[in-house]
Amino acid sequence: MSDFAPAAEITATRDALLRLKANMRQTIKGKDDVIEQSLVCLLAAGHLLIEDLPGVGKTTLAYCLARSMDCTFSRIQFTSDLLPTDVTGVSIYDETLKEFVFKSGPVFANVVLADEINRATPKTQSALLEVMDRAKVTVDGEAHTVGAPFMVIATQNPVDYEGTFPLPESQMDRFLMRLAMGYPQPGDEMEILRSPRLGYDSIALNPVVTRSDIHKMQALAGKVFVEDSVLDYILKIITATRTEVEFKAGVSVRGGLALRVAAQARALVHGRDFVVPEDVQEMAGPVLAHRLSLARQTSDALEERRTVLAALRRIINAVPVPE
Amino acid sequence: MSTAAKPRQLNLDELLLLKWLLGGALALVSLWTVFFLDIEALGLVGVAGAVIIAVLVWPQLPGRLPPLIWKLSVPAIVIAMAADLYFSPDTLPVLIRLAILLVLYRAVAYRRKREDLQLLVLGLFLIVVAGVLTVSLGFAFLLLLFTACALGFLFIINLIEASGTGAVRTAEAETAWTRLGWRNFIGRLRAVADWRLLVFASVLFTTVVVMSGLLFLVIPRFEVASGFFLDRYITRKSRSGFSDTVKFGDVTELLRDDGVAMRVDFTDASGIREEPYWRLVVLDEYAPGGFKVSAGLKGELLRGQRIMQQLRGRPIGRKVNEVGGVWTFYVEPGVSRFLPLPGSYGLLRLRDPVPLQTSPGNRLVALRTESMTMSAFQLDEVELTPTLTDARFPQLLRQAQSDPPRIDDAFRYDPRLTLRGPEGPANEAVLRRIVSEVTGGATLPAEEFSRRATAWLRARHAYALSVKIPKGEGTDDIVRWLDSNEPGFCEYFAAGFTVLARAAGHPARMVVGFHGGVLNGFENYFMVKNSNAHAWAEIYDGKAAWFRADPTPGGAAVTTQNNVGGVQQEQDSSWSARVDSLRVLWYRRIVNFDSRQQVQMIEQMKTFTTDSGSAMKAQLEEISKRLKAWLAQPWNAARLGRSLGLGAGVAALGWLLWRLTGQGWSRWRQWRRPAEYDPVRRTAGVWLGRLRQREIRSEVVAELQRLRYGRRETWPEPRAVFRRARMARRGVKR
C-alpha cells in the first residue's frame, strides 16, 4: 500500500467533510470550531470528551455527529448505580439452548454517547477502558468486537462534583481530545430561541456520509505527511510540558502520538496532505490539556482548566516555530 | 517562564551532577597549584587527587561509606593538623597541608550550597598562596582555569537554588543524581549545549579576564612577595650549587640539569657578538675539597649590606663600549643569592628596596637570602669586559702582608688568600715542578703565564664529564689530578689553573657562573639553562686589573680585550623557544611590573589611543578633501561613464561577496545539521515568513507551505513558486 494520499481522495474527503459540517450546522448554531474539532477527532479515530456546564449543547453535538453518519448509534446515560455489564453486555443462560449466550450491551455501536460519564462509579467507567483502547469487549474470557468505526463521545460536567467520580488519569489519557462548548454568541442564541425544537427526538438529520467513507477518511488521515521539523516541533512542545514546573507531570508518549495524529487529521480537514505548524498549535490545547494536571491545588476544575490552557499557550508561544 | 523558553535544558539531577563535576575540577585545579610550591605535600596531593578523581568518576562512592567515617573525619583532620604543627618547623606548609585535607574532605562529601562555597574558598586559598609564593606563568594558567571553573560552579549553584524552591525531596531523591551515569550525562550535555550559550559563556569569561587585566593595570603596584609575610614561613632548599662553597663536581651536576636558570632580556641585541660569561660567585679560598668564599669575603659582603633599590657600578662619565641597552634579568628561584653579572655596568636597579650585599673589588652583588620567587633586576650601560679593574688590590695585599689580620678576626677580608694553594711539602714540590714546566724557569707576566698554563693544561688533560682522581697519599686531589693525564671538566681546569697561578706567585681566584645561553628567536632575550653552568679563573695582572682566564678546552684561553669580531649568536626558533618566549612576556608584563612600568604602559596606551584617533581623523579629512576635489573636477560623458562603471563594479563585487557569504553560511549549517536542513524548505520558510508579515493570503502561500512542510514528491516546481511569491509581494507593495 502506498504512503501517499492521492489528490483525488483528499478532495473527496474535503467534500464529505463539508457536507458533514453543513449538516451539523443545521442544529449546532455558531459553534463551527467545535464542529471542526469533533470532525478532526472522528478522522483521527479518537474518542471525544466534551466537558462543560449543563445545557450548553454537549449531548446535542454528539447526537448530531452520530446522526450525520450512516452508523449505528447508542446512548448510555451514566448514573451511580450503572453496572459494568450494563455497558458491555452480559452472558445469560439460555434455557432452550442450554448454554450461555452473550447479550451485547449498548457499547456495541459505531458511535457511543456516554452521557455524564463522571456520574458512574470508577468500576463502570473502567469497563469502558478496554473498549476504547482495543474496540473489543471481553466477557467470560470471550472477546467480542464492537462496531467499526468505533467512537466514544463522552460528556461530563466539571462543576458538579457532588455525587460524581472524577475520571482517573489513565482514562483521561484514552480520550484523544477534550472539548468545551462554551456559551453561544447572542445572535446564535437568538436563533436557537426562535427554533421550535425542544427534545433530541425532534432533531431530524439525514446521514450524509457512509460508514465506508469514514473508514477511507480515517485511513487517509494516517497518510498525511509530517515533515521532520514539524515532528521536532511536536517533540519540543511535549518536552517543554515535562520541564514546566507548573505541571505535576508532563505529557505521556501516548499524548505526543495523539498530538501528531490530531494534527494530521486537522490537516486533512483543511484539505492538505501535509501538516503545518499551525495544525500542531491548534490541536495542542484540545489534545494535551486534559492530560496535564497542575502541581498545586486549584479551587475548582474550571480554574484548573484555565490555568493549564494558559501554561500550554505560554509554552507554545515560547517554542520556536519551524520556519 | 524560563522552563518554557528553554525546552532543552538539564533537570535538577543533571545540574547536581554537573555541579559535582565542576566542584571536583575546582578541587583538582587548586591541588595542582601545590606542585608549584616547594613544600612536603606532594604525596598528600597525589593521594587526595586520586581520591577526588575516583569519587568524580563514581559519584555513588561517598554514599556507600559508613556514616562513622564521615563523623570521624573532622576530628581526624584536627588531630593530623595538631601533630603536623608539632613536628613541622614552618607554619605555612602545615596550613597548606590542612587546606589540602579540607579540600579533599569537601570534595568527596556530598555538598549543599554552604559546603560548595566552602570548597570554593578553600581552593581560592591554595591558589592565592601558590600565586603569591611563585608568581609563575603556570600559576596564571591555573588561575584562568580556576576562574572558569568557579564561574561555572557559581552559575550552577544559582541555577540549582532557583529551580529547587519549595520541593521537598526525600533522602532517596537527594542522591538520585549519583546514579545518572556519565555516558547518558555527556549525551545530555551535548544535546543541551547550544553555541549561543557557549559564545555567551566565552564572552563572559573573556570580559572577566579583561576587566581583571585592566584593574591590574590601574591599581597601585606593590611587590607581591615582599608585601606578604608568607615566604618567611617556608624554609627553602637550594636547588643549584651556587652557594658560598663549591665542591668539585657541584657544577657538573648542574650540567646535567636542562632546567632554565635565568632569562636575560635586552632592548637591543645587535651589539652582542660573543657568549657572555655570567659571573655569579668568586671563590677565593682554597680548601682541599674545592674552593669556597672565604669568611673574610663574606664578612666584607655583610659589612657592605645596605637597603638599596639602585646600585652604581662604574664611576659616572667613563666611556665604555656599551651593548644591549637595558638588560633585564629574570633569575629563577633557587639559583643563587648572588646576582649574575655579565661585565661592568653603569647602574643596577631592583624592583624594590631590598638589603643588598656588595663587594666592589670582587664585583659581587648578593641578596641577603636566596629568593623564594623569581628575582628580577636591571642593568644599564653594560660592557661585556673580561677585565675587572681593582686598583686597590696591590695596596691591600701589601698591607695584609706587612700587617697580617689576627686569627680571630676571620671576618676581615684577607687578600693573601688569593696566593694560597695546597700546602705541605709534597704538594708544593709537585706544583713547583709543574710551574717550571710551564714557565721554563722564567718569571713571566700574568698574561703570558695564563696563556702557557692554559696550553699546558689543555695539552695534558682532555675534557670529560666524569673524572677519575688517581689514588695517592700526601697530596691534595687537585694536585694529583694536575700531575696525571686524567681528563677533567671545567671545575678541574679552573681550579688547576688557579692553583698553578698561585704557585707561580700570581694572585688568582676561581669564578663560577654561567657561560653562554641561547638567544630566543621570537623575543630578544637570552635563555640560560642550568646546563650552561661553568667555572673559570681570574688572575691579577699585577698592575690594576683582574682578567678572565678560561682554561677549559673550547673556552678562550685568555681574554683581556673585548671580543669585537666574534661570531653571530646562535638563535633558537623552535616551538619550545616560542613557548618560553611567552614566559618572558609574562615576566615583563606581570611579574616585573613596577609602578614605573605601569605609568609607562598607561602612557603608551594613552598615546596609542590618541595617536590612532588623530591619525584616523587626519585620514578621514584627507579622504573627504580628495573626494571634494574629485567632485569639483569638470564632468564629461567619458568620466561619468567611467565612474558609473567603477561604481557598478564595486556594487557587483559587494553583491557577490554577500551571496558567497550567504552560501558559505548555509553550507555550514547544512554541514552542521544535514537532516534538518534543506535549501528549498528553508527558502520556502523564508518566503512564508515574508508573506505572513504582509498578511498576504494567496494561493502561493499554500504552494509555499507544500514546499516547506509537504512531501518532496508532491512539490511543485520550487523556482516557479518562489517567482510567484515574489510577484505576490510586489503586488501588495504597489
Image (cartoon, rainbow, N blue to C red):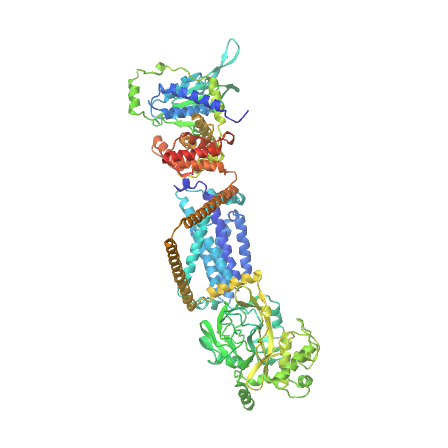
Taking B380 as reference, is B538 left or right?
right
Q: Could you tell me which quadrant the C terminus of chain A lies in?
A: top left
Q: Nearer the viewer, residue B283 or B542?
A: B542
Asked whether residue B467 is in view, the answer is: yes
Taking B127 as reference, is B256 left or right?
right
Q: Nearer the viewer, residue A310 or A246?
A: A310
The correct choice, above or below, for B408 with respect to A292 in the image is below
Q: Nearer the viewer, residue B299 or B722?
A: B722
The correct choice, above or below, for B220 with respect to A267 in the image is below
Asked whether residue B112 is in view, the answer is: no
In x, y percent, where is residue B534?
A: 60, 73
In x, y percent, where is residue B128?
A: 46, 61
Q: Could you tell me which quadrant the N terminus of chain A lies in?
A: top right
Residue at 50 percent of width and 9 percent of height: A95
| Residue that protrudes farthest toward the top in the picture | A96
Q: Nearer the viewer, residue A132 or B381?
A: B381
The correct choice, above or below, for B599 with respect to B189 in the image is below
Residue at 50 percent of width and 80 percent of height: B360
In x, y percent, where is residue A37?
A: 40, 26
In x, y percent, where is residue A45?
A: 46, 24
| Residue that protrudes farthest toward the bottom in the picture | B402
When asked about the image quadrant of residue B557, the answer is bottom right
How many labels were placed on the picture? 0
